[in-house]
Image (spheres, helix red, strand yellow):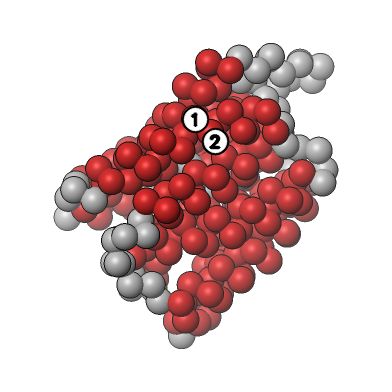
Amino acid sequence: MSTLVLALAAGAVIGLALGALGGGGSVLAVPALIYLLGFTPAAATTASLIIVTATSATALYTHATSGNVRWKTGALFAAAGIPPALAAATLASRVPEPVLTAAFAATAGLAAWRMFTASDSAPGRQPRPVRPARAAGAGAGLGSITGFLGVGGGFLAVPALVSVLGLRMRTAVGTSLLVITVNSLAALAARTGTHTPLHWAVIAPFTGAAVLGAWDGKRLAAKISGPALQRAFATVLLAVAALMLTDALH
């Protein structure tokens, strides 16, 4: 199978995940770029941030038109995450790749466990009031993970918004996309001086397919129940965690 076809197929799947689940895009993009398209880990993390920034911004627009974004909560998360994302990105450049891979796997596995154990809001249950300190603290933690692991952070933002702030699944999905977009841009800014080669002949079609997939993902989210989205999200994260952990141990 040609590199172009693989890039288009992988991009479509990542976009679908981001549009439907509000996360999982970068956690899927990094292994796809490494294992399917031959990128080095450093190049894959940078390329994935480009892909996820464009895709999450598109998905954010589609969710915002449906009223599924809580802008105040998302802004608090995103603003609190920018300084930690920048600092963690600098630290990550000094850590051996196997350690980063193992940390990536452990974080994805933890997020999957939280998604399996967290339940969507019951009928009639109202979201909790937004507490600035709580939202800012969670946002700072998410920003650190984004900068350190080179991912958008949606795979942690969604469970945090559901379990910490009590948002319904669809609202958490839409709000997380704002956090992903801002955190990914901050992490990219921290990588501008790394001189990592970027293969635009692969990144461009990958990104285009991901953006188109995000539109379909939003429509998919409207047809699937919140708990079903959570289970699908957690299953994908577990598979990625197992793959990355196996790679780190070899």
Place of residue 188 in the rendered image (x, y in percent of width and height, measured from the top left)? 43, 54
**Residue in front for this viewpoint, 184 or 30:** 184
Q: From the image, tell me which residue sits under label 1.
A: 80
**Residue in front for this viewpoint, 3 or 180:** 180
Cβ atoms at labels 2 and 1 below 8 Å apart: yes
Residue 109, labelled with which disc? none
Q: From the image, tell me which residue sits under label 2.
A: 78
Query: Which amino acid does the dot numbered 1 rest on?
Result: Ala
Crowding at dot 1, Cα within 10 Å, few <14 / some 14-19 / many 20+, comes out as: many
Place of residue 142 in the rendered image (x, y in percent of width and height, measured from the top left)? 45, 34
Query: Which amino acid does the dot numbered 2 rest on?
Result: Ala
**Residue at point 46% right, 85% down?**
2
**Residue at point 24% right, 51% down?**
93
**Residue at point 42% right, 53% down?**
189
- The secondary element bearing badge 1 is classed as helix
Q: Give me the C-alpha separation between circle 2 and circle 1.
A: 6 Å
Kindly indicate the quadrant of the structure image that contains residue 148.
top left
Residue 56 located left or right of residue 32: right
Place of residue 248 in the rendered image (x, y in percent of width and height, measured from the top left)? 22, 51
